[in-house]
Image: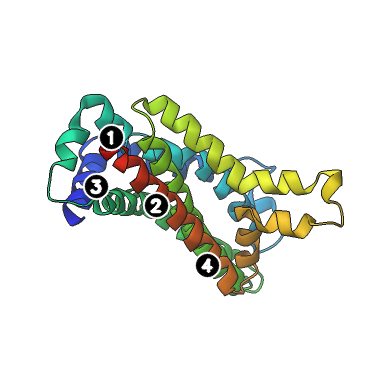
Amino acid sequence: MGAIFRKEINAFFSSLIGYIVIAVFLVVMGLFLFVFPETSLLDYGYASLGPFFTLVPNVFVFIIPAICMRAFAEERQTGAIELLVTRPLKDVEIVLGKFFACLLLVLIALAPTLLYYYTIYQLGAPVGNIDAGGTIGSYLGLCFLAMAFVAIGLFASSLTSNQIVSFLLALAISFWCYFGFDYLSSLSIFYLNGETFVQSLGMQDHFRSLGRGLIDSRDVIYFLSLTGFFLLLTVLSLERRKW
């Protein structure tokens, strides 16, 4: 697994892929949070990172599938997957190596945003007037979101040799898992009859729960289960060649 992890990290940073992903993410977040007045933290009126945590999942839905789309699709297209699977590695080790490499790239892109917290912390009146518990919970939620989206992206990439198809498939699944259940719960058939349950099936409800600053084991188990489910599907997808 370590060899696959190092291989993927080197592939990200030996080319422009890793740097472009990090730069695009930070530029987009910077524009929305400090330039565009509708979403600017400086015009928000409160010492809060609420707009930031509302915006990041929307960006993750697009940027993480773009990171993961080449993970298996490119190797299937070039035939390198056949060389990879002949090494003394289990399929689960290959999947986990790629998973942790992609996740690390997302976390590296997310790390500089801690400067936003410091900025709002200093701008608060009085200084430090910010909900630290809610911020920590929201950052933890972003890490869990990244894990789930990366697992979805790897699964989509394992299904096809076309990177564009992989991206679109991961985008569709990620969008549904994050937004879809909230939209579904708003249908009249669920009004006062299972609305809360349907919402609890989606990632957005659990992310909002973590953002309140209370680390509920149900939210943690949900994200870990969802991540594990899609990683298992990825392993099964790789094992298709043996069937």
| Horizontal arrangement in the rendering, residue 9 relative to residue 62 (left or right) | left
Query: Which comes sooner in the sequence, label 3 or label 1?
Result: 3
| Horizontal arrangement in the rendering, residue 53 relative to residue 86 (left or right) | right
Q: Is residue 127 visible?
A: no
- Crowd around label 1: few <14 · some 14–19 · many ≥20 (10 Å): few
Q: Is residue 161 visible?
A: yes
User: Which amino acid type is shown beneath numbered disc 2?
Assistant: Leu
* Viewer-proximal residue among 197 and 10: 197
Residue that label 3 marks: 9
Q: Secondary structure at mark 4?
A: helix
Residues at circles 4 and 2 in contact by the CB criterion of under 8 Å: no
Residues at circles 4 and 1 in contact by the CB criterion of under 8 Å: no
User: Which amino acid type is shown beneath numbered disc 1?
Assistant: Leu
* Viewer-proximal residue among 69 and 29: 69
Residue that label 2 marks: 232
Q: Nearer the viewer, mark 1 or mark 2?
A: 2
Query: Which comes sooner in the sequence, label 1 or label 2?
Result: 1
Could you give the CA–CA distance between mark 4 and mark 1, rounded to whole angstroms?
Answer: 35 Å
Residues at circles 3 and 4 in contact by the CB criterion of under 8 Å: no
Q: Secondary structure at mark 2?
A: helix
What residue do we see at 26% from left, 52% from top?
97
Quarter of the picture holding the N terminus: bottom left
Query: Which comes sooner in the sequence, label 4 or label 1?
Result: 1
Residue that label 1 marks: 16
Residue 229, given in percent of the width and then of the height, sits at: 46, 54
